[in-house]
Amino acid sequence: MATTSVLTPIKRRDGIFSTRFAGGRVPLTPSPKTPRTQVIQDAGVPTESIHHGNANLISRFSRSVSKTNVRDSPKSNIASRPTRDSPRRLDLGVSDFALTGTGPRPGTATSAKNTPSRSRSGRAASVHRTPKRTQSKVNYTAADRFIPNRTTSEAISTSGAVVKLDNEQTPGRRPKSSASDGSVVLSAGASSAFDLGRHPSSSDTTASLSLEGLSLNDNDEDDENEAPMTKASPNTVAYQQSVAEACGVSIKQRILAFKPAAPESSRPIDLRSQYNRPIKPAAASASHFRRRVLTAPERVLDAPGLVDDYYLNLLDWSSGNQVAIGLERSVYVWSAESGSVSSLMECPADTYIASVKWSGDGAYVAAGLGTGEVQIWDVEDQTKLRSMYGHETRVSVMGWNKHILSTGARSGLVYNHDVRIAQHKVAELVSHTSEVCGLEWRADGAQLATGGNDNLVSIWDARSLNAPKFQKTNHKAAIKALAWCPWQSNLLATGGGSHDRNIHFWNTTSGARVNSIDTGSQVTSLRWSMAYKELVSSSGFPDNSLSIWSYPTLVKNIEIPAHESRVLHSALSPDGQMLATAAADESLKFWKVFEKKAGTANLAAGGSATVKAGLTKATTIR
Amino acid sequence: MPPASKEDRSKLHKLALKGSSKTIVEFFDFACNTILFQRGVYPPEDFTTVKKYGLNMMTTCDDQVKAYIKKIMSQLSRWMQKAKISKLVIVVTSKETGEHVERWQFDVNMFNDASKKKPSASGDKENSAPATQEASPDKSDEDVQKEIQALFRQITASVSFLPMLDGNCTFNVLVYADADSEVPLEWGDSDAKEVKNAEKVMLRSFSTNSHRIDTVVSYRLAD
């Protein structure tokens, strides 16, 4: 846009002018931004210049240039005028204003950023084009960007009226023109003013004013003009100052707001209640957790030769209250009731025990070997019932669902074995591409969750094992820790390894992740409490601890420094109160983490029972 | 520690600004959480206790709020490290009337850059005599933590004189930044969101080796 329109702030001139300028802008310099310079020109008629905003800029320029010795830009006009005709100048005062406004002036500064280069080029262009045209126009561009607040300015800017002055004009006329201009201006200020240029006055003015040529030469002239201008019009100065001031403030500092709205609070808050209770959440969690958790182990046993391998599952506690642990090549059974230990089995020297799992009734132990063989032992008789083959790689995790034994192997395959029949392999669950190290049946046997070294959690529907119902890739490390919530059957907790450290909670009906905890350390196992809405997680590096979390608040109730090296396995006693943990420091420790208060029922057993008990209690109190 | 560090002056100071900024941003984070909790912008169930500054600090555990604050703080720490910030303001606004009812302003004063640069410049040459940093005497971390603790105690205690809020409020975070700061899209120019007809109370200040934070809370006078 070559338009040379400048806003003129305010001049000393007539009230009219001043009003105009004040209200609007004077198009002094071409403002790059304002495309809508309006030039009033009549190509044919030298005298009149009426321009409509956008159409004519170029034309204007060209015309103007040609006409006058004067340069294209209105500014230049101003400048030129002084030289030429004194009277005109007077009339032109308006134009002068324009000049001042436009010029290199500081006042314009804001616009200046964008404009200067453009304006010049525009001028230049205009100059070249112009020569032929006789008329010169003054454009009022909407340029005042500086002053956003002015109501008038908008109108002006839009209108971008151009007043042309012809050099030729007679002094006598000029006054008219000026008057007309003024009127024009006024009108412009009013709003639609642009047309003004076209008004008779404009025509006169056009004649009188030949501004166009101005622009090119203007620089020098402008300068000259400017200086006087500033002096002349205090208003301008003030204006500039104010602009500068405004700019200055903003330049040094801005107030920035974070724009996105703050999240809505879930409900209105009654502050009074808040003040009246001791810091609530703390209190809440504390009271919630008023029960004491013994931070010292109930019992410590040695577990010599416990293989320090995250992927194995070597500890299990039976419903008959016996603990089985795999130590290198042997499986030992420790009776929690009598405290007696017996060696159940020993595997061949070329392999080792990779997993141990009690059957649901507590009568049998399944042992997975490094070779891929799975043995089932009758504990009472201390005899091996059968061996099941199929896996080519070590069986690192197993899970019973009644007579079905699921075995996960290093190959990533999971087989379901029906242990009652000769052709034991009844299903092959293909999903993992790397070692399966976590496997857990839901208590009702309807779903199976598996976790692998491929960072994948697969949730299977027991009725269709061809493909997993859900595959969850949120974890960033192997998933060994899996636990089904006892009181909400479709809630599954999974814990990731050392690069993940998260516990995720899943709704296994919808597949949605419902919660997450960043535990800060490798999660090696997870157990839900049967009596409290809590779960315990065991940690590997760096904490080697047990953490008890409330659910669904996810508040960590306590962290027990448990072992000297990473906790590898855990198992919950059949009554749900005691947790056994086996760690790489070759010890087996028992913790009373979910000690029951007298009279509370297990959540899993029946939530309704608990509620009833609570109710009766309440009524008795009353 | 202080004696040993002398030789590393130059290093120390580079790190000092960063470390100090971190301290400050962390402080802002907790301050923001504390205010949201204390002034009932979010329900108390949404907060959990964290031990910090030797106090039980309340921090939100609501994912959205957490993320919201985190976004602010991460940008803040960028600005802080470039020393672009002169004020952080948390404005509590009534949802019903849209009035700003409370305004917590934290003025960030950088200690004189010159004083810091000097020692660092001469520092690598020799063990400059204990640098003349009137503004920032070397302060141990503990001292800083203690000052912050005292400030938080005061903020917590301020509920006793602040007017009741109706519990239906939201909040905004404003930052007074240098104009040449880089401004991400999510931030935009704003007015100062001053509280009308406000009473101002100056709270304690605290300082690190590079910054001093002054705290002012302004609130609407009871009608």
Image (spheres, coloured by chain):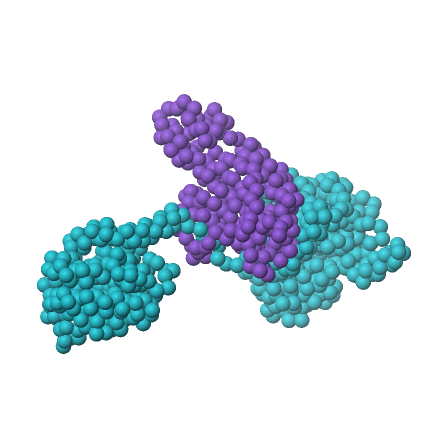
Chain colours: A cyan, B purple
Above or below — where is B73 with respect to A39?
above
Q: Residue at x 14, y 73 (%)?
A: A47
On the rendered structure, is A526 left or right of B174? right
Q: Say above or below: A394 vs B200.
A: below
Query: Where is residue A74, by image quadrant?
Result: bottom left
- Which residue is painted at 88% across and 58% down in the image? A619
Could you say which quadrant of the image residue A60 lies in? bottom left
Can I make out residue A346 in this image? no
Identified at 42% across, 45% down, the residue is B84
* Residue A34 position in % (x across, y down): 28, 65
* Residue in front for this viewpoint, A195 or A432: A195
Residues A459 and B49: in front is B49
Residue at 40% across / 31% down in the picture? Answer: B115
Spot occupied by residue A372 in the image (x, y as percentages of width and height): 62, 57
Q: How many marks?
A: 0
- What residue occupies the far front of the structure in this picture? A172
* Image quadrant occupied by the C terminus of chain A: bottom right
Q: Position of residue A512 (x, y in %)?
A: 61, 64
Residue placed furthest toward the bottom: A44
In-front residue for pair A31/A475: A31
Residue A270 visible from this viewpoint: yes
Q: Quadrant of residue A392?
A: bottom right
Position of the N terminus of chain A, as image quadrant, is bottom left
Q: Position of residue A10 (x, y in %)?
A: 28, 58
Nearest the viewer among A403 and A618 is: A618
